[in-house]
Amino acid sequence: MNTHIAIADHSLDELDRLADLAADVIGRARAAGASQAEVSASVATGLAVNVRLGEVETVERNLDRGFGLTVYFGQRKGGASTADLKPESIEATLAQACAIARYTEPDPCAGLADAALMQHEFPDLDLWHPWRPEVDRAIAIGQEIEAAGRANASITNSEGAGVQCGDAVGVYANSHGFLGRARDTHHSVSCSLIAGSGDAMQRDGWYEYVRDASTFPEFAAVGRKAASRAAARLGARRLSTRECPVLFAPEAARSLVGHLVSAVSGGALYRHASFLLDHAGKAVLPAFVNLVEQPLLAGGHASTAFDAEGVATSESALVAGGVLQRYVLGSYAARKLGLQSTGNAGGVHNLKVAAGSREGAVLDFAGMLQRMGTGLLVTELIGQGVSIITGDYSRGAAGFWVEGGKIAYPVQEITIAGNLRDMFMGVQAIGSDVDPRSSFLVGSILVGRMTIAGE
Amino acid sequence: MDSSLALVEHSLLAPGGLSIHDLERVFSRVMAPSIDAADLYFQHSRSESWVLEDGIVRDGNHSIEQGVGVRAVAGEKTGFAYSDDIVLPQLLEAAGAARAIARDGNGAGKPLAVRGARALYPADDPIDGLDNAAKIALLRELDALARGLDPRVQQVIVSVSATHDSILVAAADGTLAADVRPLTRVNVQVIVESNGRRETGYAGGGGRCGYRELIDSGRPQAWAREAVRQALVNLEAVAAPAGTMDVVLGPGWPGVLLHEAIGHGLEGDFNRKGTSAFAGRMGDKVAAEGVTVVDDGTLPGRRGSLSIDDEGTPTHCTTLIENGRLVGYMQDKHNARLMGMAPTGNGRRESFANLPMPRMTNTYMLAGRRDPAEIIASVEHGLYAVNFGGGQVDITNGKFVFSASEAYLIEHGRITRPVKGATLIGSGPEVLTRVAMIGNDLALDEGVGVCGKEGQSVPVGVGMPTTKVLAMTVGGTASG
């Protein structure tokens, strides 16, 4: 017979309190003359423990509150926020928001999202799995992870192993009468290790990021993976300047998906600051590529039934057969463009990138290396050299030179450059090796040709 | 009595019924024989921002944040907790959570003694220091100015923002110090369009001063012109070269090279842990003859400056590299104690809800003697990079990048065509050994820097004179 140990869970009471507060403040904003108002309020708690060289290094307890109010007086807007929920702070926030709206100017696109778009159904998306280990237990997990990594003979030093747990409750409410509640948990374990010494030192790491702590893989495996990644970088060389195919490992590939999302997002489009302006209905990727937004994915990292304006979310294609199906819009950008909100205020809610290749085959990571044959495998990108307005791309990279489908040696201190438009159209294959730690569910991406700058 | 202390005591402690004497009671709760250090960091922070876009002042925001962070340190262990409620029961509870890293025991801190420091900026609140109508007028003026400069200007986004931050630090070592910190910022972004090609340009700046001082300086108007100029230059830019070549960095903001290539690697925590490429290299030659780099938190009114750091230590001008030799690290109290060194006033934190760590303030290279024109003329084939976006470094292997946002080819000693932004990559311990010429035109940036480390952002400054670096890797797409 199982014995359940109940964890005191006050989250529903907390949500009720936040909901009451939101409704009260919206009422007071209306009484103060605002024609529309919206409130976000949240409370997040957590514990973060870091262990280094077997000893506890830091123990941090977190409790963060947030309250934000936006008021509209006709089409004039004012916003204010506070990081505590005391009545006098809330009162000051209301006064500040209203004061600001006296100075902003009428913006024909300002206002809440259309009332007809509000969500009415709130399914359980399996996002709430509180995990509140005792500090000693969290320390022991960190020690187990780090010790497993330091058992690797190449490891000479450590930046430590971390264990973090967190839960957040929040509400969004507006004067259409919409009230959305959300509870979600996220927990992570991480390890960062150093191999080699002196000028040859290399650092790398690994982490796991989950909603439900019972789904963590074996803790020791995180340390072992961090160690083998750091050790694999020992003896890294530069490459000569050249053009070649580039395979983005899943942890690097997700940044490419991020650039695509930025380029089709409302803010970049209405400002004419995107290289994908006016591309709805046009090919932006090869025909074998499909991207589907899945906001209602059970347990997804970015799952939600309503966006940051209360608009109902739903599963919807972003790219089908390589063709851009729609943009990524909240209500403000939508009005600027003469379009309808796509339920993307606050961002994209899980984006699944289907695996495939120009030849039709679905390849795992080993298959992707084979498919590339000879070229550069990128495992880490550094720097910000990406222009969404022109698509120009130039970033620092580290990874491995690959010959005949096999990793030959590690490389570092090189850049990879191209234009995102060409890089996207030049995608040769997308692997089935999906990285589950991100809300962009994508495997490795093979780009046909980029410029490498090195020696 | 220190005037900022009186101000801050009134605004931070008095509303919760707290006195300085109560803080000593908190230390008696935190301290135990095994606790080496403990501190309390009280903060009240108010910020605002105003945005003009498409010719409309469309958004304004105001935010308030306050709370207290409690830290207890035993050897290399740190316990930390915070509360957004500045009253005694919450303070004692946070203290209990922070000291959980130590075994039981009783102790007490030293009596608190006020530590004054020279004030590098006025305590005045920039938000209330200028009425909202004048802020709106500034936004409108900059919008009209930028649009009037060239018909190719299609979009202008102007923002102004300000923060007023009051802090009080009390530590078991007897430190009691307060600081009131203004910070203002103006930013102009333009988008230009010509023959279907679109480009953008940004400029901005600010510092630890009021809006009025910025407006009276005429700098916001100069930033509007600069944003338009940069965007128009980019309209003409051709593909950047790929490969290794000599690079001349312009004066001012290109000092971000120093921040990434050597600054982070000289922060005390990475060197105590032996994880920096510079660890154990004190006294070594890490730069060419003539290269001297300092981190200086004492420049009046600068964005990266602080009268005291977030541990109550007055900021210093710390020499990091002197005539090519590594001579100093940047330290907070914790790492300084563990390394047997003195704190350098570099202990900083994003807010009361974050732990302090060694961070840069204003990092720059001292001027040399060369005429900048002579430096350009000395390059047969290379790149002249005058503006940058951000950068990043891996402190362990020392590899760093920074991305040019405005650059030109140098051909036969002359600046010729503008090229598109490209990332420059190099190795921190190596790059300064290849500095071949240093100009006489040291400039600091306009006040735009934000540095991120372990998830915490703090304002910083950088600077350098025109500098020639041999054989850097330029990450463009054009061969040859």
Image (cartoon, helix red, strand yellow):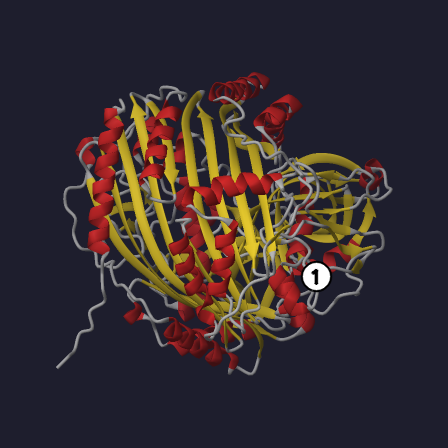
| A127 sits left or right of B330 in the view | left
Q: Position of residue A75 (x, y in %)?
A: 32, 22
Three-letter code, disc 1: Ala
Q: Is residue A207 left or right of residue B277?
A: left
* Disc 1 secondary structure class: loop
Vertical relation: B312 (above or below) B140: below
Q: Position of residue B365 (x, y in %)?
A: 76, 47
Q: Which residue is depicted at the point 32% across and 34% down?
A: A91
Residue B382 percent location from the top left of the image: 74, 45
Question: Looking at the rendering, in which quadrant would you find the N terminus of chain B?
Answer: top right
Residue at 56%, 83% in the rendered image: A153
- Percent x, y of residue A351: 32, 52
Residue beneath the point at 67% across and 49% down:
B314
Q: Nearer the viewer, residue A107 or A385?
A: A107
Q: Which residue is mark 1?
A: B342
- Position of B159 with respect to A132 (left or right) is right
Residue B444 visible to an observer of this rendering: yes
Q: Residue at x 31, y 67 (%)?
A: A132
Packing grade of label 1 (10 A; few <14, some 14-19, many >=20) is some
Is residue A439 visible in the rendered image? The answer is no
Q: Is residue B156 above or below residue B339?
A: above
